[in-house]
Image (spheres, rainbow, N blue to C red):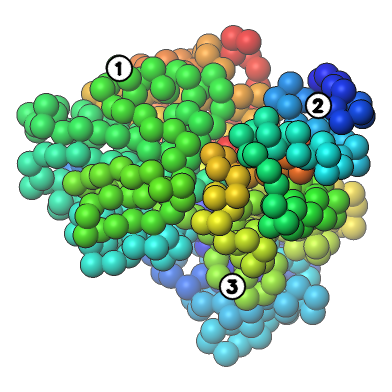
Amino acid sequence: MSTREIAGQTIDLTDEGFMTDYTQWNKEIAEILAKEEGIESLTDRHYEVMEFMRKEYEENGTAPSIRKLNKLNVVPTKELYQLFPGGPAKKAAKIAGLTKPQGCI
Amino acid sequence: MILGAGTAGTMMLNKLEAELSKDEWHITIVDQFETHYYQPGFLFIPFGIYTKRDVMKPKREFFPPGVDVIFSGIDLIEPDSNRVKLSNGKTLNYDFLIVATGSKVNPGETEGLTGEFWQKNIFDFYTIEGACNLSHFLKYWEGGKMVLNIIEMPIKCPVAPLEFVFLADWWFTEQGIRDKVDIEFVTPLPGAFTKPKASQIFGDFLEKKNIRLIPEFNTGRVDGERKKIISWDEKEIDYDLLVTIPTNMGDSVIERSGMGDELNFIPTDPFTLQSKAHENVFVIGDATDLPSSKAGSVAHFQADILFENILSAMDNRPLRAKFDGHANCYIESGFGKGILIDFNYDTEPLPGKFPLPGVGPFSLLEETKMNHYGKMMFRWMYWNLLLKGAELPIESQMMMAGKRV
């Protein structure tokens, strides 16, 4: 656990750089985190997906899976990989200020 | 009422039937199929170690006399009305429901997987048909590139894909064609396994056996014509023989009944095994959404916990027994050896010794002949003790004794 000054605000992070309190998040923070993940600028589409993920997180305490985002017609899997190249589940959660998605055994 | 007479459902049936008073309780079990398959045995079929006959028995052999057995599909579960509608037209009511409908592979979830090459040079080994077809294919294969591919997690028995490539390395060596076969292990995980220590040790085994590990590959589609698997971000891997672990999902009746998540697994309390949505519905084995392995050993440990909790619920008492996520897996590693892992929700697989009264100790995370015997002995235990609900000399809670932290 660590804290960090970002966009004039102090945020709490895990060792892997995931925010531990999603309420500390705002769009300025998201832009900076996105750049660090190799995404130059966030589009409306990015925010649409992240807002949905944040709403799910608020309701269920965990970020939705890629499959759920696809099934609920939030974003097709193919597009999600284009929006958040690399590991979209982890990357999108990180930029959206959510904790690391639960892995499985 | 118990839905599903697989490993978990059959164990619960036997445990409850032996305990519950016939004057007060009536048990019904429903399943659509009459044959019980020993699923851990599917792994051995492609290599001719087991045949179909070694892994099948009639389900009836494991049902105690006096219980109501219905062979029928299930159309709909209506947990708000405590009712189940069967495909045979009957509607049954229950006081308590145990859902043990399991999980199965769904190759249709991946574009291009079930096309004209399915079961020709693309196989699964999680079904009896796939395992038998692959056995026939391997018998006459002269070599090339074999890709073992996990489409997405979670999957049933997460160690089985590793066992498959370990055994394949041995089998091709035995056939004298190992130098003509390239083996690749392609997984969406960051390493060979889900847990860090075991992942590293299994990674070393893969390297030692000259099996190439390709991590973080998320398969989007298969191009059977060009013999390639293609990831969501357009990376390509070619193959001559594709052995795939398709998407695993809970039964479709769970989706129809609105009881599941996006993979048709039922949201379940990870400790008490009570369904999160309905107090009188309990879930066991692969049908749950628990972050534990989908494996027979896990279902077995869960059965001990669920048995206690069901009895408490019937007496209207709090649910005291807590499942800890315990899993215990013998991993066949080829050349007559095996590896054992033992872990739970909080403790990842660790090296050391695993004590087992009368037989053990077994070595953990190490290749030994003893672990291989443990694996082969297990089939006998499964048919003769485990399914019948008998006590095994292994605790349902994980023990730290022997483990090196």
Which label's residue is closer to the chain start, 1 or 3? 1
**Residue pointed to by mark 3:** B253
The percent position of residue B280, horizontal first and vertical second, equals 80, 64
| Front-lying residue, B366 or B242 | B242
Task: Report whether B267 appears left or right of B210.
Answer: right
Count residues near mark 1 (Cα–Cα under 10 Å), then give few for <14, some for 14-19, many for 20+.
few
How many angstroms separate mark 1 from mark 3 (CA)? 44 Å
Q: What residue is shown at x 76% (from left), y 33% (from top)?
A: A32
Three-letter code for the amino acid on which mark 3 is drawn: Val
Q: Residue furthest bottom?
A: B89
Quadrant for the N terminus of chain A, please.
top right
**Above or below B229: residue B162:** above
Three-letter code for the amino acid on which mark 1 is drawn: Lys
**Residue pointed to by mark 2:** A13
Count residues near mark 2 (Cα–Cα under 10 Å), then give few for <14, some for 14-19, many for 20+.
some
**Residue pointed to by mark 1:** B208
**Disc 1 versus disc 3: nearer the observer:** 1
Task: Report whether B89 appears left or right of B174.
Answer: right
**In the structure shown, which secondary structural element does the residue marked by tag 2 occupy?**
strand
Q: What residue is shown at x 48% (from left), y 19% (from top)?
A: B200
